[in-house]
Image (cartoon, rainbow, N blue to C red):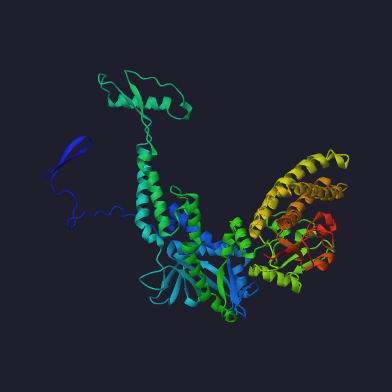
Amino acid sequence: MGSTIISEATLSSLPAGWWPTNGGFISLDTYSDYTLDYEAMYRRHNNVKICVDFLARNMAHPGLHVYTRDKDNGRVRLREHEAVQILKRPLPNDNKVTTYKMLESVLSDMFVSGNGYLLKIRDGDNKLKGLLRIPYMLVSVEGVLTPTLYRVNLGKSELKIEPSEVIHFRTYNPHNNTYGISPLEGLREILAEEHENTKYSSKFWQNAARIGGVIERPPEANDWSDAARANFRAQWESLYSGQDNAGKTAVLEEGMQFKPISWAPKDTLYIESRKLTREECARAYHIPPPMVGILERSTFNNIESQNKSLYTDVLGPLFRSVQDDFDTQYLSEFPDMQGAYVEFNIEAKLQGDFEKQTASFRQAVGVPYMTANEARERMNLPRIDSPEADQLVTPLNMSTPATYQEPNDGKSVDRTAPTPLPPSVEGVERQAEGGKKAAGFTVKPEFPEITEEAVKDWTELVSKTLTRQRDAVLPLIKSAKSLPLWWDEERWNREVSADFFALSKTTAGAYARAFASQLAFAYNPEWMEEFLKTNSRIAAENLNRSTYEQLAKVMGGEDPLEAVKKVFAALLASGLLRFVMFRVHELENFAEYDVAEKSGLIKTKTWVTRSGHPRDTHAALNGVTVGIRDTFPNGAMWPGDYRAGASEVAYCQCSLVYGRAKE
């Protein structure tokens, strides 16, 4: 049976069996002329270049570190050894080769061809002095089970190199062990298809998509001769084509009509083809699609999870492979480096997510781990000329090693452990921890979850307060002729007192409810409001007075505007946290005391000193027990009680242990 096709508007008949056959299956070599080498595939196919560059850059960025083990099997980083210096500077400066460039180029070679080569450069004494990348296309490897010789084609000459003189990075090859197979081999058909599609699209736009419209002549019009048709076309193009003729009105004759024709890019499936090639290249290199710009099915959550998998499933095995190659082929050059190993500095890549890194460190350490000036250095900000900015601040409810400053003598102290408690207090705490409910049962309230939340809330409030004051003061400094003009004491005392009172009720109320629940006592938080109103006013006035005094000291300088900025910067960096910690601890002590006193269940209270360098008066009070309604020898009802005077209150870290009556 024959077939009929349309060819040039003519019906043609073909005999049966005209189609090509091969054992019953069609066999067409569509891309037989696609024989590009790896270099050309990298240069011409942007999707390949994107994937190769992505892997090479992300692996070269962390840099290489060298480590060894001490006698206790501890990890020690080497910085001055010759092996480290060569990695840090692979070649003399005149060669303009950095560690990053060396790694990027040799890893790109491996991802393009399956092989990357570094030549060991030696001096006259045969001592290793540098590393030089050899482009993969210049190298051929002899051997099957192991490399026996490397040949480098230099054009007019050939360089023969022993295997010991080359660091060879390679991918897996099922055929032999001497050289790797390029990942591009698995993509050759996909890239050939893209190549043909690109040629087709180019011809399509050249031949078809340039048609802006057609001119139709009515059927009854006279026949055109070839010369008349050519003449009309020439006139039309000269009158209406080109930028000089843009916007002109065309005039048609003999009932002619112009019909515009447009082509949509989607009709060529060009974009879809490009996306498919990008996805196939990403799969070939095991790269999560969003990492190379394929975002159609991406969400914030899956991008975040795929970013994590980048360092475990994608770069992790590659890092391990390259590290092992350096260990066996590079560090073996140095006899004194037995047991040493090379690692990529993965932490450098994790630094991009500073928020998560900070949260992780804070959770592991439990306390702030940077001083204010260390944090400012990371942010490229100038140092603060204040001793407090170089001290590590420690929350008052923590007992961890830290350096801090007590106000009674101004000495910096290394607190490596809390002050040992007297035997009586140690026994009190152990009894409380045992949970015994017998005669003389003692209670040591501790609510770290409430403290953590309260510190966060007070930090936010005080930060906003200082920022608001700064923004109000700075514009007035240039025009102010006397100090009262730029500091509105009445306003700040009123506003800050109101803010402090609102948050004090929340903070103290949380501690009171928690302690009352522990005592099985129905406590009404409204009982403490009158005290908190006065207490908040005093705290606000003290904070405002301290801020004003620090500002007043710098107003007479040459540049008061800049000096005031530094004062507020220091307050926000270090002074804020110290005030917040004390404020929260003060409210906790008061709330717990008020619950204990009003419950009728507590008969005694014992002063416990927590600081590693307390005031002399507080050190003398450590372990002192008085009745629940009695004052301590320093005049305070509880640590932080303002009735004892400012010298007994500021930055106090002490607390109370309560003695309960017989049940």
Comparing 20 with 62, the one in front is 62
Can residue 545 be seen here? The reply is yes
Q: Which quarter of the picture shows residue 248?
A: top left
Residue 650 to residue 65: above or below: above
Relative image position of residue 26 (x, y in whole percent): 21, 53
Residue 474 to residue 129: above or below: above
Q: Quadrant of the C terminus?
A: bottom right
Relative image position of residue 61 (x, y in whole percent): 56, 61
Q: Which quarter of the picture shows residue 589?
A: bottom right
Comparing 287 with 591, the one in front is 591
Relative image position of residue 254 (x, y in whole percent): 31, 18
Q: Residue at x 29, y 52 (%)?
A: 30
Q: Residue at x 28, y 20 (%)?
A: 218
**Residue closest to the far left:** 1
Q: Could you tell me how many numbered marks the image carries?
A: 0
**Residue closest to the far front:** 663
Q: Quadrant of the N terminus?
A: top left
Can residue 488 be seen here? The reply is no
* Image position of 51 (left or right of 608): left
Comparing 598 with 33, the one in front is 598
* Image position of 551 (left or right of 33): right
* Image position of 623 (left or right of 23): right
Relative image position of residue 124 (x, y in whole percent): 60, 78
